[in-house]
């Protein structure tokens, strides 16, 4: 999984640690209120990372398409500007 640079990886790691703590606290509260145990497995976190990875890939693709689209628009504007200048020179 390519999550990007080290600062992004550090942010993801921090988020996973916060989630683990939150899930643990919520599980304890659930047990205190209803006397039912909950279990969070490592697979849950792996699924979360896979989901994040898939969403990241989707967003990267979207950004790439938008950059291409906008670049095409900019090229058209530049071409139009060059043509207008050419027409103005001939007048």
Image: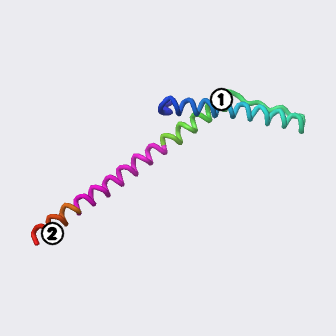
Dot 2 and dot 1 residues touching (CB under 8 Å): no
Say whether residue 74 is left or right of residue 40: left
Using the rendered view, name the quadrant where residue 36 is placed.
Answer: top right
Residue 24 position in % (x across, y down): 77, 31
Q: Residue at x 63, y 34 (%)?
A: 15
Q: Around disc 2, counting alpha carbons within 10 Å, would you say few (fewer than 14), some (14 to 19), or many (20 or more)? A: few
Q: Residue at x 39, y 49 (%)?
A: 65
Say whether residue 29 is left or right of residue 66: right
Kind of element beneath mark 2: helix
Residue 82 position in % (x across, y down): 19, 61
Kind of element beneath mark 1: helix
Instruction: Measure how far apart labels 2 and 1 are at the Cα level.
Output: 67 Å
> Which SS type dominates the magenta stretch?
helix
Outermost residue to the top = 42
Circle on res. 88: 2
Q: Which residue is mark 1?
A: 43
Say whether residue 86 is left or right of residue 76: left
Residue 55 position in % (x across, y down): 53, 42
Callout in the foreground (2, 1): 2
Residue 26 lies, with reference to residue 74, above or below; the image says above
Q: Residue at x 79, y 36 (%)?
A: 26
Residue 87 magenta-drawn? no
Residue 20 lies, with reference to residue 83, above or below; the image says above
Q: Which residues are magenta?
A: 58-80
Residue 67 magenta-drawn? yes
Residue 62 position in % (x across, y down): 44, 48
Using the rendered view, name the quadrant where residue 44 is placed.
Answer: top right
Q: Earlier in the sequence, mark 2 or mark 1?
A: 1
Name the quadrant of the C terminus. bottom left
Coloration mode: rainbow
Q: Around disc 1, counting alpha carbons within 10 Å, would you say few (fewer than 14), some (14 to 19), or many (20 or more)? A: few
């Amino acid at each position: 999984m390519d999550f990007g640079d080290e600062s992004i990886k550090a942010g993801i790691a921090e988020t996973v640690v916060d989630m683990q703590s939150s899930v643990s606290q919520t599980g304890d509260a659930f047990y205190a209120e209803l006397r039912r145990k909950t279990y969070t497995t490592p697979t849950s976190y792996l699924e979360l990372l896979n989901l994040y990875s898939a969403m990241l890939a989707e967003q990267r693709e979207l950004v790439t398409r938008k950059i291409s689209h906008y670049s095409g628009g900019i090229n058209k504007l530049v071409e139009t500007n060059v043509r207008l200048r050419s027409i103005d020179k001939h007048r």
